[in-house]
């Protein structure tokens, strides 16, 4: 090792799902929405062709059009909304902004695996209280001194959601630190903690356009909270990169917010297909956790998950396998279109010899 290499920051990076590109594949491994964005987004995108002159200019560093659209949709003020390049960017800024006490940040042992990566990158101590045997949070594990709390609700990769009273109980017990609730999947059956914002100044809620609004490729995430929290996040953001949101993202994001009917129809279609797929999987010998997300977390009664994962991949069907303690025999299966899920069922029946 060269002398200057000794000063590198060493972390175990987050590993995203595969992004294969070939015809006829069925991609159910990264929780993308199988339906296109709102037609209003397509209209706005077409309009960009006549506005390329604006590409030479820096975008609005305050992201005013998008912030105002989100604030209006949720009944908040613009001072309560922060936007970033996907919810990963928003969460990263939150870690950097709020978790500086020297005390450990708490998040579950089985949850979104980027949390411990950010903690390592930013030198933040952390502890991971174990989920119980049913993959649920034990609220009493969060009744202690800490440097902050992060809870994905619904959780990933388990798909399990906790109710509003449960979340409020944790926030109420931790008013000396910031509690971040990551609601990336909340639109598929979870209950948002938004009603709690008026009661707790230490609560930050993070959501994304990547899942329910079918815009993973556009990269829009946002946080909602007390103006003091949002102001602090903006101060950090402006100290790193003032122009994080590009002009097309601001325009397309604001357009998506205007089409609430389409948004809700897409979510309902995914929920219906999810429940159909759950029943179909159970009929093949799988057990699925009760899902409030756009994916299922499933284990088979006799065939190892790793073997099923490999067999599906050979057939051009991609699901997510996690080679980690406690969940190494589970598959996370994104809910695709009804047709895709029917093809998945046929492939699984073949693999299982049914």
Image: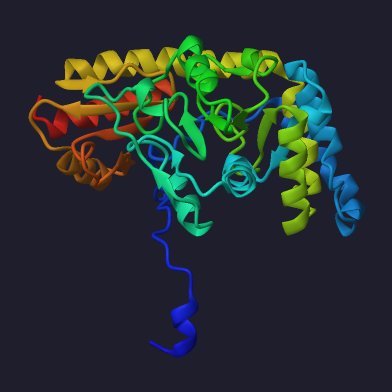
Vertical arrangement, residue 346 with respect to residue 198, above or below = below
Image quarter hosting the C terminus: top left
Left or right: 337 as drawn, with respect to 354: right
Q: Position of residue 345 (x, y in %)?
A: 25, 25
Q: Work out whether residue 40 or residue 65 is closer to the camera in this orientation and state it.
A: 65
Q: Image quarter for residue 283?
A: top left
Left or right: 238 as drawn, with respect to 31: right
Q: Position of residue 84 (x, y in %)?
A: 69, 43
Q: Work out whether residue 40 or residue 295 is closer to the camera in this orientation and state it.
A: 295
Left or right: 293 as drawn, with respect to 100: left
Q: Work out whether residue 96 or residue 35 is closer to the camera in this orientation and state it.
A: 96
Q: How is the image coloured?
A: rainbow
Which residue: 79% across, 54% down? Answer: 242
Image quarter hosting the N terminus: bottom left
Q: Is residue 45 visible?
A: no
Q: Image quarter for residue 353?
A: top left
Q: Work out whether residue 164 or residue 322 is closer to the camera in this orientation and state it.
A: 164
Which residue: 78% across, 20% down? Answer: 76
Q: Position of residue 91 (x, y in %)?
A: 58, 42
Q: Is residue 342 visible?
A: yes
Which residue: 46% across, 82% down? Answer: 5
Vertical arrangement, residue 217 with respect to residue 36, above or below = below
Which residue in the rendered view is the most extreme toward the bottom? 2
């Amino acid at each position: 090792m060269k002398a200057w290499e000794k000063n590198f920051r060493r972390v175990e990076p987050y590993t995203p799902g595969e992004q294969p590109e070939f015809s006829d594949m069925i991609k159910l491994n990264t929780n993308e929405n199988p339906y296109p964005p709102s037609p209003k987004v397509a209209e706005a995108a077409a309009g960009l062709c006549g506005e390329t002159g604006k590409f030479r200019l820096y975008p609005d560093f305050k992201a005013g059009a998008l912030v105002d659209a989100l604030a209006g949709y949720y009944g908040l003020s613009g001072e309560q909304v922060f936007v970033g390049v996907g919810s990963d960017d928003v969460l990263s800024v939150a870690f950097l902004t709020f978790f500086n006490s020297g005390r450990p940040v708490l998040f579950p042992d089985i949850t979104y695996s980027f949390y411990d990566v950010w903690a390592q990158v930013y030198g933040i101590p952390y502890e991971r209280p174990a989920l119980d045997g049913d993959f649920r949070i034990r609220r009493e594990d969060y009744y202690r001194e800490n440097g902050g709390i992060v809870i994905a609700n619904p959780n990933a990769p388990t798909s399990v959601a906790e109710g509003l009273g449960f979340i409020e109980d944790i926030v109420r017990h931790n008013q000396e630190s910031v509690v971040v609730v990551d609601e990336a999947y909340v639109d598929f059956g979870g209950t948002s903690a938004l009603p709690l914002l008026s009661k707790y100044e230490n609560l930050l809620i993070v959501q994304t356009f990547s899942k329910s609004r079918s815009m993973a490729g556009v990269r829009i995430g946002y946080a909602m909270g007390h103006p003091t929290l949002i102001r602090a996040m903006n101060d950090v953001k402006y100290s790193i990169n003032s122009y994080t949101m590009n002009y097309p993202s601001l325009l397309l994001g604001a357009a998506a917010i205007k089409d609430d009917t389409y948004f809700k129809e897409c979510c309902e279609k995914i929920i219906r297909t999810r429940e159909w797929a759950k029943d179909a999987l159970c009929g093949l010998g799988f057990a699925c956790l009760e899902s409030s997300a756009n994916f299922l977390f499933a284990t088979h009664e006799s065939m190892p998950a790793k073997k099923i994962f490999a067999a599906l991949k050979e057939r051009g069907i991609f699901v997510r396998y996690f080679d980690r303690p406690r969940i190494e025999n589970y598959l996370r299966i994104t809910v695709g279109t009804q047709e895709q899920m029917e093809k998945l069922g046929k492939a699984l029946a073949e693999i299982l010899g049914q």
